[in-house]
Image: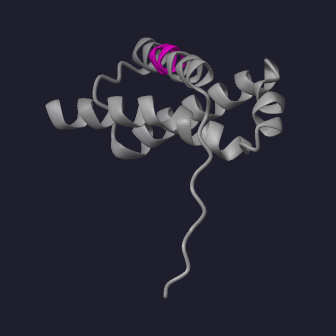
Amino acid sequence: MPARLPPLPSIPVPFLRQILVRSILVWLGVRGAAFLLFGLTVPALPAAGLVVALTVGLTTWDGRRLSEHVFLANLGIPVWVLALAAAVPPLSCELTIRFLA
């Protein structure tokens, strides 16, 4: 019988909603800054990866600044789950832009 992986810890809905909205707002800011500075409408794949990484980093940093990581750690949720949740909006937006362009 194969070993089962433990389930992913789930973030409470109010915190997940805040993380997702904050991630979308940070992504819009990063994309807006890239457009104003470099005129990038549909960036190359490495630039899109940089936008996603920057968005995840800034969103995770903001969550740590607001001490959300301490509350989530008390619930047994590690910081990487916060980063994983913050990666969903920019990744889906960048993929949508790539497929529509």
Residue 95: percent from left, percent from top:
29, 37
The answer to which image quadrant residue 93 occupies is top left
Does residue 57 appear to the left or right of 99 in the view shown?
Answer: right
Question: Who is closer to the viewer here, 39 or 33?
Answer: 33
Residue extent of the magenta highlight: 24-30
In the foreground, 97 or 40: 97
Inspect the magenta stretch and tell me whether residue 51 lies in it.
Answer: no
Q: Who's the residue at 43% across and 11% down the image?
A: 36
Q: Residue at x 33, y 40 (%)?
A: 44
Location of residue 4 with respect to 10 vertically, above or below = below
The colour scheme used here is one colour
Residue shown at the point (62%, 46%) measured from the top left: 9
Quadrant for the C terminus, please. top left
Q: Position of residue 42 (x, y in %)?
A: 28, 29
Residue at 45% x, 35% y is 88
Is residue 72 shown above or below 49?
above
Tell me: residue 11, above or below residue 80.
Answer: above
Nearer the observer, 48 or 16: 16
Indicate yes or no whether the magenta region holds residue 27: yes
Asked which quadrant contains residue 35, the reply is top left
Lateral position of residue 83 relative to residue 96, left or right: right
Q: Quadrant of residue 14?
A: top right
- Which x, y percent locates residue 37? 47, 16
Query: Which is the main secondary structure of the residues drawn in magenta?
Result: helix
